[in-house]
Amino acid sequence: MTDQITRRVFLRRAAASGSILTVPGLLAACGGGKSSPGTTGDTTSHQLAKTLHFSNWTLYIDNKPGGRHPSLEQFQKKYGVHVDYREDINDNPTFFSKIEPDLQRGQPTGRDIIVMTDNSRYPSLLIQKGWVEKLDKSAIPNMKNLIPQQRHPNWDPNRDYSLPWQSGFTGIGWNEKLTDPVTSMGDLLGNKKLKGKVGLLTEFADTLALVMAYNGDDPSHVTDQTFNRAIDTIQKAVDSGQIRQFYGNDYAGALSSGDLVATMAWSGDIVQLQADNSHLKWQLPDTGGDIWTDNMLIPKGGNVYTASVYMNFVYEPKIAAEIEDYVNYVCPVQGAKEVLVKEDPSIANNPLIFPTKKMLDNVHTIDPKALNNQKYQTTWQNLTSA
Amino acid sequence: MGFGFLHRHRGSTAYLLLAPGMLFLVVFFLVPLGFLAYQSLESGSIDFGYAFTWAWDNYSSAITGYGTQFKRSFAYAGIATAIALLVSYPVAYWIAFRGGRWKNLLLLCIVAPFFVTYLIRTLAWQTILSDDGLIVRTLTDMHILSPGGRLLATGTAVVAGITYNFLPFMALPLYVSLEQIDQTLIEAAEDLYASKWTAFFRVTFPLSLPGVVAGTLLTFIPAAGDFINAQLLGSTTNHMIGNVINSKYNELIDYPAAAAMSFILMAIILALVLIYARAVGSEKLTG
């Protein structure tokens, strides 16, 4: 593992600041990148644009000193397309409110590819509102390399609009110096020895999915009854003082310092944190975890052909491996592992990066309808910001 | 136009000088405020769009749904303001009357935390109040805190964080008004057989009231709307109305509800300020 100031370590510090301190609505309404996108409006042409405007999360691609991204340089060399790579996504809601005014008015956002997480409501919302373009699948033959578990998400069943960039698991992290292994949600929510030292995630989809699976309900099909049951379970844990706080990325600091003994946690964070603190452990809960995926999408007005050609490029196993070697999240591209086995075996053999089939069978994805249910969202918000 | 213009139009000079400020306020304060007011009466959702419908129930449901957080915000802000006053007054007093040639250096020390961003200062308190940190361990050893007790992720930590973060807003106006006091007045009181305490309560304190009023307002108003301290130092039951507004706006994308809550917060603060000004006498506000 080289260049280990990777994405999450940075985010851990930045997220607390970034996500809290943004005043997105007004600022977005006033400013926002209005540079012309790499298109002249003819989104179906098979001509490559000069520039591809790509908005991604911070530290989420291969990085070399001097701010270089070798994979992007190779793309430029091969296709003659310059990539205007912007790391301007810090969290889903804020980024959405940044592009929403343009989409609402039917104006191009100045971007050809954006990356949004499917455990937020936004990817399905963008599709519903017709604010994203269909992929040009004829330009993406490498789509065959997408791992089978990712081919038919319930919010975009045929991957007509989206292609995974990276995924991550939501499970339980704990500090083995301070507690016995915590591998079940029952333990996390009810073990008296952990009282006041347990964190849950503010992210609605993550917490809901794990608790619903624990209740024996199906997270991919949420009903009022199963939703309320999950809320009751969480409320009980909150009322008993078991839960210290609901966290975003900032649980990482609390877990490292010992203020949290066990917490719901994202797999990629733990890969990073383990580099500093080998006592941190992570596992999917026995009743199942949650998998979320950051998806590449083409916002309305983006250049479909150029974006599709780029997507095809990153789905070449060799390129995917290069990116994965830096990013350390869950790789959606078949064949990348085989490349890395030779080049960086510690990455290739890490089940948090290339998960086993058993792990993939033990994870759920959340019902997109629940994510877009305003009533559920409000109930959740009232619980987490009481 | 040169100075000649100003000479010929004496009366307009003031307006010309005021113009940039007024323009700034109109563009960056009044216009957004109007926009916010409009938004607070909309209904709908991000999925289907918002429409202006005179939706007054945004206001009523904000009060019925989040009364607890409103009350908690004012309670936390009130306690923090009181503590800040009690802590700052002696400090400001000492600097003003006994600071001598160290005055500027001491004032700089008060302002020093401002050189670090708000967020980093608050994050530092996470470390200071950590369960395994020095303060918690010391308090536990002294049996002030029960074993397994904690400071971080409690209401105490939130109030402490707010107090600390807004302390300079209290201390500086206090210093300014204390520094302006004519010391011969205090000597005169003592010549007339007032004890030190009587002189303080009859002369010094009343003369410093403008500073007290300015300091409490500057502390209380932003503190009531704060959400960073509650988010970083609080627990699941310590959230303030700022947290609710933030999550309504950023997570639920429920702009109307967030706007309505902002207006309610503003209205309550305005009412409290008016009552306060009436109580201490409005002439004290301007000194």
Image (spheres, grey):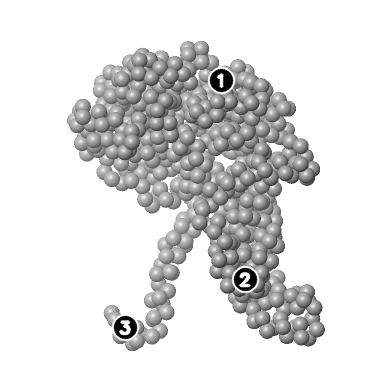
Q: Are marks 3 and 1 on the same chain?
A: no
**Tag 2 residue:** B99
Please determine if labels 1 and 2 lie on a single subunit: no
Q: Image quarter for residue B276?
A: bottom right
Residue B40, image x, y percentages:
53, 51
Q: Are marks 3 and 1 in contact (CB under 8 Å)?
A: no
Identify the residue position indicated by label 3 in the image.
Answer: B3
- Residue B61 visible in image: no
Q: Are marks 2 and 3 in contact (CB under 8 Å)?
A: no
The residue drawn where x is 64% and y is 81% is B182
In the shown orientation, is residue A117 left or right of residue B125? left
Disc 1 residue type (three-letter) = Leu
**Residue under the image location 35 percent in, 15 percent down:** A342
Viewed as shown, does residue B251 lie left or right of A200?
left
Q: CA distance from mark 3 to mark 1?
A: 76 Å
Measuring from the top left, give residue B78's x and y in whole percent: 68, 57
| C-alpha separation, residue under disc 2 versus residue under disc 3 | 44 Å
Q: Chain of mark 1?
A: A
Element under disc 3: helix
Residue density around tag 1, few if under 14, some if 14–19, many if 20 or more, within 10 Å: many
Element marked by disc 1: loop
Examine the rendered structure and indicate whether residue B61 appears above or below residue A221: below
Q: Identity of the amino acid at label 2?
A: Gly
* Outermost residue, front side: B101
Classify residue A348 by image quadrant.
top left
Q: x and y percent of residue A78 in the render?
A: 21, 27
Q: Nearer the viewer, mark 2 or mark 3?
A: 2
Read off the residue under disc 1.
A284
Is any atom of residue B6 visible in this view?
Answer: yes
